């Protein structure tokens, strides 16, 4: 969808300069098609909001660390400097885990490539079972924040061109439905943009609110160097109605092909 809009804009500018009327019409059509797909994301309700000074804030970082990253110490150093409360890592490596654990972070999912890092250990891990031949990969655990329970979950979905991604999204909705959602936080590399049918379907069925609004996180690099113009928002953070959004931002390049997504939440004040 962003490519439609960019090509249409370039085509329109060229056609105006060259006096090509039919090309102008085709370009306007491409821009309109792009806007038709993207604009609903800009008008979407992202849930309750909280002021910058809201009490008991929770800083959440979602990052795909890239499994073949040659400079994992750079990611670890940046994460350690963020004073975050929750770090979820997709394509996590054991050397990254060891670096964070060495600095006192606790891990859920330490044996795989999806990990949740928190300053304190989880209270329990109630992992819903997948159906036979399930395709979903996820890690979840229960924690406490400000004296109240909190469910954390992270996942990594396949590219939408793969044949089993529909099964993954169906299984994800089923897993979330079996967990407490009021104060749940779900993060991950969904490999799906907000204007895709896949993510729009999850927005409707998860019972959670996606707090990011069109924040592009990919690609973050090209030929091993930082790429300053990401155009696909594919990393996302969902939260239950018990959370209000304080701030959503994109982090700097830390050597991965994804930029970090940073979402700060605060508990919704009781009525």
Image (cartoon, helix red, strand yellow):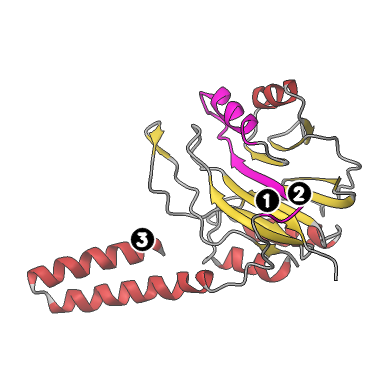
Q: Is residue 164 visible?
A: no
For the residues labelled 1 and 3, the Cα–Cα distance comes to 26 Å
Q: Name the residue located 68 percent from the left edge and 46 percent from the top edge.
A: 59
Q: Which residues are magenta?
A: 53-82
User: Looking at this view, is 143 or 133 the one in front?
Assistant: 143
- In this rendering, position of residue 22 left or right of residue 135: left
N-terminal of the pair, mark 1 or mark 3, is: 3
> Which residue reaches farthest front?
53
Few, some or many residues within 10 Å of mark 2 (<14, 14–19, 20+): many
Real-space CA distance between mark 2 and mark 1, rounded to the nearest whole angstrom: 6 Å
Earlier along the polypeptide chain: callout 3 or callout 2?
3
**Within 10 angstroms of label 1, few (less than 14), some, or many (20 or more) residues?**
many
Q: Quick check: 151 left or right of 22?
A: right
Position of 253 relative to 149 (above/below): above
Question: Residue 176 occupies which quadrant of the picture?
Answer: bottom right
| Residue at point 53%, 28% (across, down) | 69
Residue 175 within the segment the image draws in magenta:
no
> Looking at the image, which residue sits at the far left?
18
- Horizontally, residue 148 falls left or right of residue 56, namely right
Disc 2, disc 1: CB below 8 Å? yes
Name the residue carrying label 2.
153
Q: Nearer the viewer, mark 3 or mark 2?
A: 2
Q: Closer to the observer: label 1 or label 3? A: 1
**Residue bearing the label numbered 1:** 187
Which mark is first along the chain, 1 or 2?
2
Q: What kind of element bears circle 3?
A: helix
Residue nearer the viewer, 41 or 133: 41
User: Where 75 falls versus 62 (above or below)?
Assistant: above
Q: Secondary structure at mark 1?
A: strand
């Amino acid at each position: 969808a962003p490519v439609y809009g960019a090509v249409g804009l370039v085509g329109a500018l060229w056609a105006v300069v060259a006096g090509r009327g039919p090309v102008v019409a085709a370009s306007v059509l491409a821009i309109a098609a792009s806007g038709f797909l993207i604009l609903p994301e800009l008008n979407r309700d992202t849930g309750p909001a909280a002021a910058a000074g809201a009490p008991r804030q929770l800083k959440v970082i979602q990052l795909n660390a890239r499994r073949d990253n040659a400079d994992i110490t750079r990611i670890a150093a940046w994460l350690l400097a963020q004073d975050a409360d929750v770090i979820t890592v997709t394509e996590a490596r054991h050397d990254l885990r060891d670096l964070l654990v060495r600095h006192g972070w606790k891990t859920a999912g330490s044996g795989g490539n999806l990990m949740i890092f928190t300053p304190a250990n989880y209270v329990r891990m109630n992992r819903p079972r997948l159906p036979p031949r399930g395709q979903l990969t996820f890690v979840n655990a229960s924690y406490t924040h400000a004296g109240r329970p909190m469910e954390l979950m992270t996942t990594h979905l396949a590219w939408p061109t793969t044949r089993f991604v529909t099964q993954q999204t169906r299984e994800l909705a089923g897993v979330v439905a079996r967990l407490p959602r009021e104060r749940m936080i779900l993060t991950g590399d969904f490999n799906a943009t907000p204007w895709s049918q896949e993510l729009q379907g999850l927005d409707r069925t998860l019972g959670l609110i996606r707090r990011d609004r069109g924040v592009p996180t990919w690609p973050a690099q090209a030929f091993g160097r930082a790429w300053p113009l990401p155009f696909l928002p594919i990393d996302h953070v969902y939260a239950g109605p018990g959370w209000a959004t304080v701030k959503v931002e994109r982090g700097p390049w830390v050597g991965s092909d994804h930029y970090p997504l940073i979402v700060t939440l605060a508990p919704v004040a009781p009525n």
